[in-house]
């Protein structure tokens, strides 16, 4: 068992694995995702703008504006990646599609 430092609650290996994968994905795409790639990622995962917007707690119109940006803020990007359950394979796929 591993422990979280704040609450000293035991956590399992699967929790630590998910955190490691999340860090790997975020490091891989930080500063590299444009709105167009974000749109491709959403389509690849089979989500509609409304679905992702609801998970983020924003309107569909606000999410649409994110997909039109040339630079996506890292904190917003992290939330989007988490909400769509992205994998490193997904990121690799959109990078191949966009190039």
Image (spheres, rainbow, N blue to C red):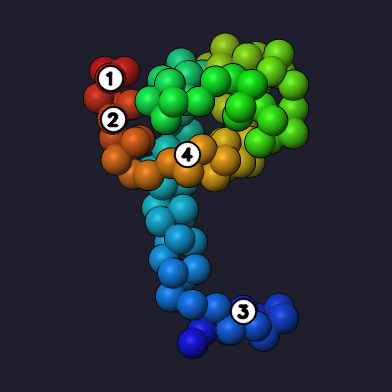
SS at badge 3: loop
In the picture, the disc for residue 30 is 4
Q: Which one is earlier in the sequence, the residue at label 1 or at label 3?
A: 3
Nearest the viewer among 32 and 66 is 66
Pointer 2 with pointer 1, Cβ within 8 A:
yes
Instruction: Quote the CA–CA distance across marks 3 and 4.
Output: 26 Å
From the viewer's perspective, is the residue at label 1 or at label 4 nearer? 1
Q: Which one is earlier in the sequence, the residue at label 3 or at label 2?
A: 3
Identified at 33% across, 26% down, the residue is 94
Q: Please name the residue that numbered disc 3 is placed on.
A: 4
Identified at 49% across, 87% down, the residue is 1
Q: Please name the residue that numbered disc 2 is placed on.
A: 93
Instruction: Quote the CA–CA distance across marks 1 and 4.
Output: 18 Å
Q: Which one is earlier in the sequence, the residue at label 3 or at label 4?
A: 3
Residue 35's x, y, as percent?
51, 19
Pointer 2 with pointer 4, Cβ within 8 A:
no
From the viewer's perspective, is the residue at label 2 or at label 4 nearer? 2
Q: Please name the residue that numbered disc 1 is placed on.
A: 97
Identified at 60% across, 29% down, the residue is 52
From this view, report whether residue 6 is shown above or below residue 44. below
Q: Judge left or right: residue 54 versus residue 83.
A: right
SS at badge 2: helix
């Amino acid at each position: 068992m591993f422990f979280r430092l704040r609450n000293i609650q035991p956590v399992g290996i699967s929790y630590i694995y998910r955190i490691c994968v999340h860090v790997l994905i975020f490091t891989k795409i930080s500063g590299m995702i444009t709105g167009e790639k974000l749109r491709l990622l959403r389509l690849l995962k089979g989500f509609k703008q409304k679905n992702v917007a609801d998970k983020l707690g924003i309107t569909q119109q606000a999410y649409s504006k994110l997909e039109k940006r040339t630079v996506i803020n890292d904190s917003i990007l992290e939330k989007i990646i988490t909400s769509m359950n992205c994998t490193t394979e997904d990121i690799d796929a959109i990078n191949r599609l966009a190039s």
